[in-house]
Amino acid sequence: MIQTSKSLAEILRVRREKLAELIDFPAILWSGSPSPRNFAANLFRHRPSSHFLYFAGLPLENAVIRLEGGKLQLFMDNPAPSSALWHGEMPSRDGIAENIGADEAYPMVELESHLQDAATIAVQDAASWTQQSQLLDRWVLPQRAPENIDLELAKAIVELRITHDEAALAEIRKAIAATVEAHKAGMAATSTAKTEAQVRAAMESVIMAHNMTTSYNSIVTVHGEILHNEHYENSLEPNDLLLADVGAETPGGWAGDITRTTPVSGKFSSTQRDIYDIVLAAHDACIDKISPGVEYEDIHLCACKVIAQGLLDLGILQGNVEELVDVDAHALFFPHGIGHLLGLDVHDMEDLGDLAGYEPQRERSSRFGLGYLRLNRPLRQGMVVTIEPGFYQVPAIVNNTQNRESFAKYVNWERLSQFGDVRGIRIEDDVLVTENGSEVLSIDLPTQGDHVEGLTI
Amino acid sequence: MIQTSKSLAEILRVRREKLAELIDFPAILWSGSPSPRNFAANLFRHRPSSHFLYFAGLPLENAVIRLEGGKLQLFMDNPAPSSALWHGEMPSRDGIAENIGADEAYPMVELESHLQDAATIAVQDAASWTQQSQLLDRWVLPQRAPENIDLELAKAIVELRITHDEAALAEIRKAIAATVEAHKAGMAATSTAKTEAQVRAAMESVIMAHNMTTSYNSIVTVHGEILHNEHYENSLEPNDLLLADVGAETPGGWAGDITRTTPVSGKFSSTQRDIYDIVLAAHDACIDKISPGVEYEDIHLCACKVIAQGLLDLGILQGNVEELVDVDAHALFFPHGIGHLLGLDVHDMEDLGDLAGYEPQRERSSRFGLGYLRLNRPLRQGMVVTIEPGFYQVPAIVNNTQNRESFAKYVNWERLSQFGDVRGIRIEDDVLVTENGSEVLSIDLPTQGDHVEGLTI
């Protein structure tokens, strides 16, 4: 799946040699198996564990790899002869072993005798984590934080996956290229589409045509204020803003993640333009700050300040910027974090809780305006992060009586009511931390928000 | 989700009153919950249990219904106040209860005190079947056949779901209408598409634009001889046949399931046309036979005979039709069954094994040519079945040395080799059994196979 000047086997060898520098015990990683939908033969399309994909390179099902001292052992059964009827000739264990540069390859039954002192990471599907738990004779559950050697393994993998090698970046660029194309198709479709579903279809169809899948359930909605809105039944009205948060995933599992907000009519109202420009200013300011060593939390706070200043200038907020951000007044309208790690998972390594996102000894803040920050580390060269400031009028927040009272000093609620046609705006790009600064990987997609005519698709 | 002249509550009331005529113990049905993809917050789109959908009507998550004596109790928790931030205002338990005509509605914690003597059916996701097992204090596993009162419940539900009421038919017609539209888009796209993935994208995008999902993983392939081919990476060559087996599913869960095979160039070769016409003749002959009381196995055997006769006429088979079918010579090229039940599941109620598909006391045949038949019952008015004959040159079958030898008398292997450009053909339609015969629900989609120009989309 990974195509660079190096062979897949060579890429994987380097990764596991780096792992061997960090741990002195064997690691065993499961690919997982597909989850059933409404009956056993009707399956959700299998998504292998990202940790498995990182070291095995191929989206296999029902396979296990064992890594020790830079060596790779593959455990999987050859396809049953009868499966050729239904699934065609499938690659054999030996063929796959050669492709990924495995040192040894065994049928699955041999796994049991190779488990001693091995660490693992829980996969998501129940059939597989049940097998992990049974074989290792301890509970390995996706909803439970890893402990002991499993925790040591998780930390080592975080250390590897948190910055991207050349092969990973090549894959991420492919995912982002397809994502950009999908957004362009979505913008072009918005002028004629009648429903959210039609724009979503135009976007995902581009991703599907590339033989990719979405890296998360698309958000394509005129109610951008519903942050995780995965419904598409609304019709598009001329005054609506359409928020599209859609990302492609390559067959090897690498993710793109981009958001654009565009006016259905092709032209912002003046109130929409006012708020959009604030979000865009925050977006640009954050990207300008990205550089190795910079604290991601400071980038988040930079966005908070730009948004607070913008809302102050519009008369929606009152007071001074420092105080507004200190009391989380900005978070009434920007309640989430500025972004997250991007890699094999769209929230990279979120299966490990905050182990990847948070520097050791750091914990989530209890502040409303900081608690949703998914990444709190100094940036490193080779990280890919999202930058995704937004402005939302979430009814549960801005209509909340207690908020109305406790922020009476900071918010001019009457002035806010003049911005009723701005329910939700977000602008999100994917950014690589480079040696001296940053590179916007999704640069091909315009951010100006309206005037989409003449878009090259 | 179901829109007919009757209200949803009225439709559901009739269904559970019919259930109450068949069982005298309570039935408790779980909706199930979404399965995680690569981390806990990245979920596969939830597909509720079909049995739940049949009696609850709405695609709810983490909900349970209890049916007894025609009464409906709903168990679900109201959304947490904090969920409004991420998911918007969600319908309350009481609102849903009113919509579906529940007699009572309780928070989930009350379920435990309403379980006595209740039967259930296992759902597919592990979180839910674990909860079923724990609460009912017995193993309720999707991969285990139901026993005792669970089996009685399963039989009663089969008796209800095996024929469709007016509301169900209205939903199935909607699913099929979107499916037909998707196939037309696919045919139109085939002339310009360069890859299978691009045709698949054109088809699924139509389904998505209707705010529907696919009822199974689409098969869109130039290698139709791989029966369950869920890959889309091949390029389209002018001499290829493209087999597209794609179906839409309505938001309420009702399925369509149609297959067409079209020449990439728009025009069959003479060998492709010869074989296509045989498959089409089998398709038409089977549909002509459909009527209440007719054995579905006889319809399967009708297809076998038409295919055997056609291949005999072409000189690929040798002998007489009765003998060829008796020795399963036809099954070398048509190894699967003629079709299956269609409803809330694309293979309706296949989660119950053969309980729905096979008349009591009947079992799968050990014959190669009959063992894959999914439905073996006399047809009844109100059933919807698929009719899907095919012709395939599966390498694992036709190149098998043992087959080559044991069928030497019946197959002219040299003559067969002249049909190398026919790897896989299938023609599938969805058919309602009516009072006196049948109605092809997918009639709007032409079956002639080529000359797709002028197609109205």
Image (tube, coloured by chain):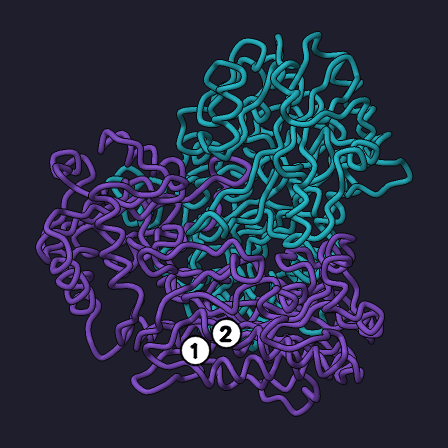
Chain colours: A cyan, B purple
Q: In screen coordinates, is A99 left or right of A106? A: right
**Rendered view: A71 above or below A171:** above
Numbered-mark total? 2
State the image coordinates of residue B50 (x, y, percent, origin top left).
34, 56
Q: Quadrant of residue A111?
A: top right
Q: Quadrant of residue B122?
A: top left
Q: Which residue is mark 2?
A: B387
Q: In screen coordinates, is A450 left or right of B274? A: left
State the image coordinates of residue B330 (x, y, percent, origin top left).
64, 69
**Rendered view: A420 above or below B47:** below
**Residue at 31% in and 74% down:** B380
Pick whichever of labels 1 and 2 is earlier in the sequence. 2
Q: Which residue is mark 1?
A: B431
- Tell me the subunit letter for badge 2: B
State the image coordinates of residue A380 (x, y, percent, origin top left).
72, 26
Q: Secondary structure at mark 2?
A: strand
Residue A317 visible in the shown view: yes
Q: Callout 1: few (<14), some (14-19), or many (20+) C-alpha neighbours within 10 Å? A: many
Q: CA distance from mark 1 to mark 2?
A: 7 Å
Q: In screen coordinates, is A43 left or right of A185? A: left
Q: Callout 2: few (<14), some (14-19), or many (20+) C-alpha neighbours within 10 Å? A: many
**Residue at 82% in and 74% down:** B415
Q: In screen coordinates, is B247 left or right of B341? A: right
Residue A457 visible in the shown view: no
